[in-house]
Amino acid sequence: MKLGQATIKDIARELNVSSSTVSRALKDYPGISDETKRKVKELAEKLNYRPNAVALSLRKSKSFTIGVIIPEVVHFFFSTVISGIEEVAYANGYNVILCQTNEKLQRELSSIDTMLANQIDGLLVSYSKETEEFSHFSKLMAQNFPIVFFDRVPEIENTVNVTVNDYQGAYDATKHLISQGYTSIAHLAGPKNLTISKKRMDGYQAALRDHGLEINPDWILPCPMGTQEESMKITEQLFEEGGDFPNGFFASNDIAAAGAMMALKKLGYKVPKQVGVVGFSNWQFCSMIDPPLSTVAQPGFKMGEKATQLLLEMIDNKDRSYDATKTLVLETELLIRKSSVK
Amino acid sequence: MKLGQATIKDIARELNVSSSTVSRALKDYPGISDETKRKVKELAEKLNYRPNAVALSLRKSKSFTIGVIIPEVVHFFFSTVISGIEEVAYANGYNVILCQTNEKLQRELSSIDTMLANQIDGLLVSYSKETEEFSHFSKLMAQNFPIVFFDRVPEIENTVNVTVNDYQGAYDATKHLISQGYTSIAHLAGPKNLTISKKRMDGYQAALRDHGLEINPDWILPCPMGTQEESMKITEQLFEEGGDFPNGFFASNDIAAAGAMMALKKLGYKVPKQVGVVGFSNWQFCSMIDPPLSTVAQPGFKMGEKATQLLLEMIDNKDRSYDATKTLVLETELLIRKSSVK
DNA sequence: CAGCCTTATTCAAACGTTTGCATAAAAAAG
DNA sequence: CTTTTTTATGCAAACGTTTGAATAAGGCTG
């Protein structure tokens, strides 16, 4: 802490008035003489007075701080969400305290604990891959503590959520592959316990079904870790097995898509000529790789903004209570690049 | 704020003892009977008591919170730094409050203001591209407020810094290009007012000089924004001008390198056969693009860790004062991929 | 000039903790 | 049984701020 920060008391002492007078003078309360106001403000300026937010926080039982729980900052999508959060929080005079879980439940639990101890006014959460049980959230909700879930939303009652239309995004991507003439399409799926994985899977299957294609369970390839190495290995294994090969890949995330593309190159298949690939998220690298990767863009920044707006509304609304699930669904955009155009 | 959080007072009231007793019992102070300790701890457990960090902060004039000022979270390198910061802060019981400047000086100034109002114990800073004057930092330093600069360090006296050996990294990269037989090497330079840009430029020039190559000022191409579009345009322009062309590019960052590579492809040059390219930072996409981009890897996570360790040491050290510039320089690693190997 | 309203200011409590000092009760010593 | 020591607890102030209620002037009214 800064040692020499001036306080209201310092101003009061120097001017031989009470702290109350100073406090009121600073905020133009009626009933303080203009003369006093002038003197107080002058001195405050001179001493570079800044109200102590901690004291305020204690007094008002409000910290103007929101907590953000996120799996990983280095994940491009999440870093764009953070930007959106920061932007709105900042514009409304709120601070952001950030914790990454690194996909660990333990970390999620203890982060929430410290954040609560720090009297955050609300919480924005995208939970970890390990989280399969949500009582640590529902307990808070039972006390009407403001929480907004984004991207990864739990399957419990009466939550407030902001998500992306994962189903539609996956549907569009798969449909696009089909319309390009790829007839046997595999899916690199995300971790099972995330709703987004399920939704993307559903969209993928629905598109196949709607276009009269059959769903081959062998071509649904779980990539729980979502690393490039993982999906490379999985793709290579698939082709080693013999039998029918898929000629299209819809991946639940860009990294997996990139991994598949590398494996295909290594195996001697041409993308997009022989095999089409579409990813999900629109990481920066999508436009830089060869061929550029088609993908489903998620509005990360907007998601951060919207989630924060919702949270601030809940914070402001004194008599809040969770009486129904409210989900704001943001639309995705299919970006067609070369990797999926024959 | 959570409405129903139990306080020491609640426990005291319920047990008919004073707050002091509760406070002491909870932390096993001597002079509290075992019986009382037991009862207090039991009830605390039952009520799910969590000390109010805000009250503690006010009482102790210490918030266990550090502020981080960063240009952008979506920048891969910075997001890895944040991870490192988080890790160490968290392990030592500190919270992290985060502000992005989006490369704006105004934002930097006001962020510092709010952070100070929130009584942060110290500051980790990588300043914005707009920042060319550092009095807002030196004022704080004059009051012995703990600040550690990382990556972008200011040219003022007695700072504590963590940087990467940008000079050596640039030198190594350029030397590597030379050793691969690229004889006329251009440099896509970063923003002028950042020390890192200068250092990388210096390393580039030194390598040329040491290997008997002449420095062509026309081939030093400023890319102040560091976007892909910018460097594409600049590269194309260079080749449109006619005259001698460079056959090697050393870029001050990966995005610029990727832009140059795209421009080269578009112009019909083969990378690495005709032109070699090396970037800086090792973004995730480097290994995914075609050809994979050689680059100078920066230890971002480690930088975050070290900077935070230094900061916490300064915070703990009561009689600190800035008496000399201390700079911790982390070594880079040249990652040779296909883009620079003939 | 007594009574009353303004106007400007102060008091004191509160937010949740910690901590030096005082105090009460019990135990030990004389 | 006094006196001293020990043991266990309580008091009160402090961190910086806000805010309802109290107070002290002075000015106006009749």
Image (tube, coloured by chain):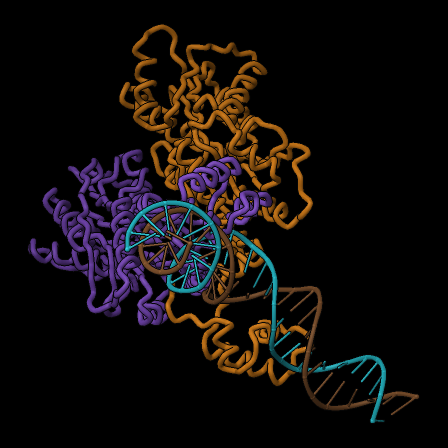
Chain colours: A orange, B purple, C cyan, D brown
Residue A16 horizontal side relative to residue A338, left or right: right
Kindly identify the residue that appears in the image at 66 percent across and 48 percent down: A317
Q: Is residue B20 above or below residue A288?
A: below
Residue C2 horizontal side relative to residue A258, left or right: right
Kindly identify the residue that appears in the image at 36 percent across and 6 percent down: A243
Q: Position of residue A138 (x, y in %)?
A: 57, 32
Kindly identify the residue that appears in the image at 24 percent across and 70 percent down: B157
Whether residue B94 is visible here, answered yes or no, is yes
Q: Is residue B239 above or below residue A2?
A: above
Residue B248 horizontal side relative to residue A64, left or right: left
Residue B272 horizontal side relative to residue A259, left or right: left
Please name whichever residue, A27 or A83, is drawn nearer the observer in this view of the structure.
Answer: A27
Q: Position of residue B29 (x, y in %)?
A: 37, 48
Residue A211 in which image quadrant: top right
Kindly identify the residue that appears in the image at 42 percent across and 70 percent down: A5
Please name whichever residue, B228 or A332, is drawn nearer the observer in this view of the structure.
Answer: A332
Q: Position of residue A117 (x, y in %)?
A: 47, 46
Q: Position of residue A26 (x, y in %)?
A: 58, 73
Residue B34 in which image quadrant: top left
Quadrant of the image containing the C terminus of chain A: top left
Q: Residue furthest top?
A: A243
Please name whichever residue, D27 or D5, is drawn nearer the observer in this view of the structure.
Answer: D5
Whether residue B221 is visible here, answered yes or no, is no
Quadrant of the image containing the N terminus of chain A: bottom left
